[in-house]
Amino acid sequence: MSTKKLLLANEDAQLAFAAEMARFCPPGLVIFLQGDLGTGKTTLVRGFLRALGHKGVVKSPTYTLVEPYIIDNQQIYHFDLYRLGDPDELEYAGGRDYFDAQSICLLEWPEKAAGFLPAADLVLQLAYEGEGRSLEISAETAAGKKLLDAISY
């Protein structure tokens, strides 16, 4: 649908981008975060949540699969599917219940649950680029395109 490429020079740039994305993100969006270990997927989630007002620690839910947050009556789910052995494991954990028109779902390692997850509105692909990170953002739906167009980073 639409793609944007950015260079995020350091962690501060990643956090700033995530804050800009959070500023315009409506309820109901599904955002896939892809990239090798250590490229900053959780950093983006941390920046997103902090921009919305979360004050606590943001850790990757590698063993619990999902970490729920409620910020100003907005439900946000942070998934880390790295350790998922089979997409059915997410089904058994009630995974479908998280995806609705009121929640924002941020998913690390979505390919581990291929065939189970709803379509992404945005796909964020991170890669090492020197000391920074390259970020390719793909809008996969009209709602994703609207968010991508709103981001002025």
Image (tube, rainbow, N blue to C red):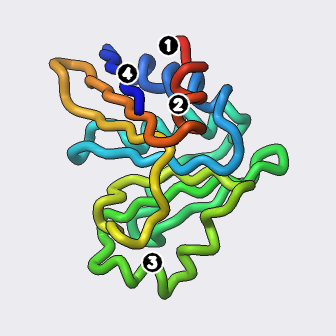
**53 on left or right of 42:** right
The total of numbered circles placed on residues is 4
Label 4 to label 2, Cα distance in Å? Answer: 10 Å
Packing grade of label 3 (10 A; few <14, some 14-19, many >=20) is some
Please name the residue that numbered disc 2 is placed on.
Answer: 145
Instruction: Return the mark for residue 1.
Output: none
Pointer 1 residue: 153
Say which quarter of the image contains residue 111. bottom left
Q: CA distance from mark 4 to mark 1?
A: 10 Å
The three-letter amino acid code for the residue at tag 3 is: Leu
Sequence order check, earlier mark of 1 and 2:
2
Amino acid of disc 2: Lys
Local crowd size for mark 2, using a 10 Å CA cut-off: few (<14), some (14–19), many (≥20): some
Mark 4 or mark 3: whose residue is earlier in sequence:
4
> Which quadrant holds residue 68?
bottom right
Among the two numbered marks 2 and 3 on one chain, the one whose residue lies closer to the N terminus = 3
